[in-house]
Amino acid sequence: MLPRFAVLSTAAVIGFAPFAVPVHGTSHQPPCGRAGTGTAVQSPVEIDRSAVCRRATPKLVIHYPSSVDGKIVFQDKAPIGGRPSEHDDIRFVIGGEGARPYITLGGERYDLANVHFHGHAEHRFAGEPFAPVEAHFVHEKAAGGRGYAVLSVLLDRRGDGRTSEHDRLFTSPPALGTSRNIRNIHLRELLPAERTTYRYTGSLTTPDEEGTYFQPVKWIVFGQRAKAGRKGLQTFRSLWPAGEGNARELQPNTPPPTIYRSPA
């Protein structure tokens, strides 16, 4: 897991209020923390919508410009070469010119480093099938040491035959270990329309440079799936041999994480 654009006001960049709305308790909340843990667990996890906690969560504000430039990389992690391995991925790496897209989480800034993809999806909602692909928006802590906040978007196939902004990132990938430049990616169009999220503290889902699954990672998983075209999803999944892919399996954490729901 690694633009030139006009500077926009926060209100113009966000374009919607839900990211700035904290969760408030209700009399129908399930108990929080009784069976789970707030300590970082191994990711990915299964999310049971009926058993999440509805306590207040840190305010999330997204500062994305209307479009950004960068490059598409078919990242080749060890073992290098040969056919794609489970640790390789297609990623959009944000360009280095100008101010960076970023989020603030509880007032702390995290800069967007890359958007990359796993297939099939890594996270799953209980009682639902795995989505064909999952997009990870990897944000790195801007100050105060190493840390990550990741927005997770599950992708389903569009039913109308059209494509989406996601298709621009993986329909025509470069060769393994190479990259190509791409311009005018509309980051906000990569997110689902409905903004409810599920949050927990976990880990990376691919090994870092030290070969470890770094913790803690602040995970923010969107409850609604976004869409991509049939050709794009098929192209991405075909990069790995049939029956394989680049998704880490669900992790059997004991105790499981406490997961918080943040409504739109």
Image: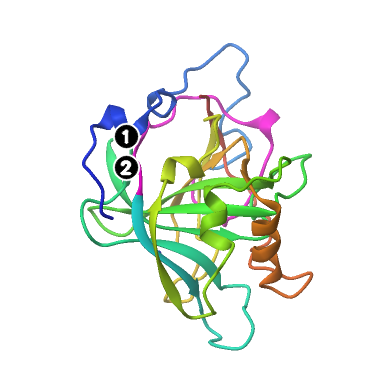
Closer-to-camera residue (74/137): 74
Closer-to-camera residue (126/223): 223
Residue 13's label in the rendered image is 1
Q: Provide the secondary structure element on which disc 1 rests.
A: helix
- Residue at image point 31% right, 46% down: 102
Locate residue 4: give its quadrant.
bottom left
Residue 65's label in the rendered image is 2
Q: Provide the secondary structure element on which disc 2 rests.
A: loop
Q: Which residues are magenta?
A: 39-67
In contact (CB < 8 Å): disc 1 and disc 2: yes
In the picture, measured across the screen, residue 228 lies left or right of residue 116, that is right
In the picture, measured across the screen, residue 233 lies left or right of residue 91, that is right
- Residue at image point 70% right, 45% down: 161
In the picture, measured across the screen, residue 188 lies left or right of residue 237, that is left
Q: CA distance from mark 1 to mark 2?
A: 5 Å
- Residue at image point 50% right, 45% down: 190
Residue 6 lies, in percent from the top left, at 23, 43
Of mark 1 and mark 2, the one earlier in the sequence is 1
Residue 187 lies, in percent from the top left, at 42, 46
- Mark 2 Cα within 10 Å, few/some/many (few <14, many 20+)? many
Tally of numbered tags? 2
What residue type is disc 2 on? Pro
Q: Is residue 41 visible?
A: no
- Mark 1 Cα within 10 Å, few/some/many (few <14, many 20+)? some
Residue 233 lies, in percent from the top left, at 67, 57
Locate residue 106: give its quadrant.
top left
Residue 240 is covered by the magenta coloring:
no
In this view, 36 is above or below 130: above
Residue 163 lies, in percent from the top left, at 61, 48
What residue type is disc 1 on? Val
